Image: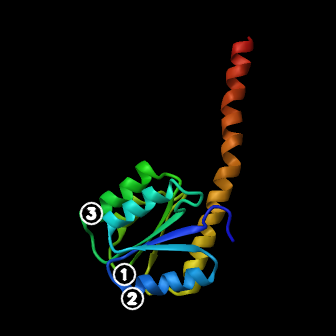
Amino acid sequence: MLQHIKHILVVDEEAELRQSIIRHLRRNGFVMDSALGDAEAKQIIAASEKTTLPVGLVIRIIKTYHDDCVEFIGWIHRHHASSSIVIISGPGNMDWIASLLKPEKDAFAQNPLTPEKLMDIIGNLEIKLRSRSISRPLITMEKQTPCKTESAK
């Protein structure tokens, strides 16, 4: 089991792909939830924050651009910053999707997506999150050290 990503929420209006992803990830030991749309997903994410196992990863399947999805991704970043996001979409111009994501904790994948590729993406996100949690205290200490030196003068 991974350290940072244990609880995953899959959001898609179509049941077939959503259930396929859930089935595969559950076999790999993840706690899984699903939502039919962004409004339901927000409720699940908010409720999970009150538990011992909040949603660590949201997988959002997007077929085409729509404002609700853009708002949903922004909402996650603003209100649940510790959750990562993977957006899965079909082929096409997806620059707008890349602009929504934070490369240090989010990812993008295009369909067709194999279960192995999805596990690779989740594993890579885990590595990014682990390196961020290790490096964060070092950055804080570096910022504090010059301040102490200046005040000591």
Return the residue at label 1. Answer: 90
Q: Nearer the viewer, residue 123 or 152?
A: 123
Residue 67 sits in quarter: bottom left
Extreme residue in the left direction = 67
State the CA–CA distance, disc 1 to disc 2. 15 Å
Residue position for label 2: 16
User: Which of pointers 1 and 2 lies earlier in the amino acid sequence?
Assistant: 2
Residue under label 3: 68
Residue 144 picture location, percent across and down = 68, 28
Dot 2 falls on a residue whose secondary structure is: helix
Sequence-earlier tag: 3 or 2: 2
Mark 1 or mark 3: whose residue is earlier in sequence: 3
User: Disc 1 or disc 3, which is closer to the eye?
Assistant: 3
**Residue 19 percent location from the top left of the image:** 44, 85
Q: CA distance from mark 1 to mark 3?
A: 18 Å
- Depth-wise, is mark 1 or mark 2 nearer the camera? 2
What secondary structure is found at the residue carrying circle 1?
A: loop
Q: Residue 52's spot in the image, x, y percent?
A: 59, 57
* Image position, residue 51 (x, y; %): 55, 57
* Residue at 61% from the left image edge and 67% from the top image edge: 6
What's under tag 2, amino acid-wise? Glu
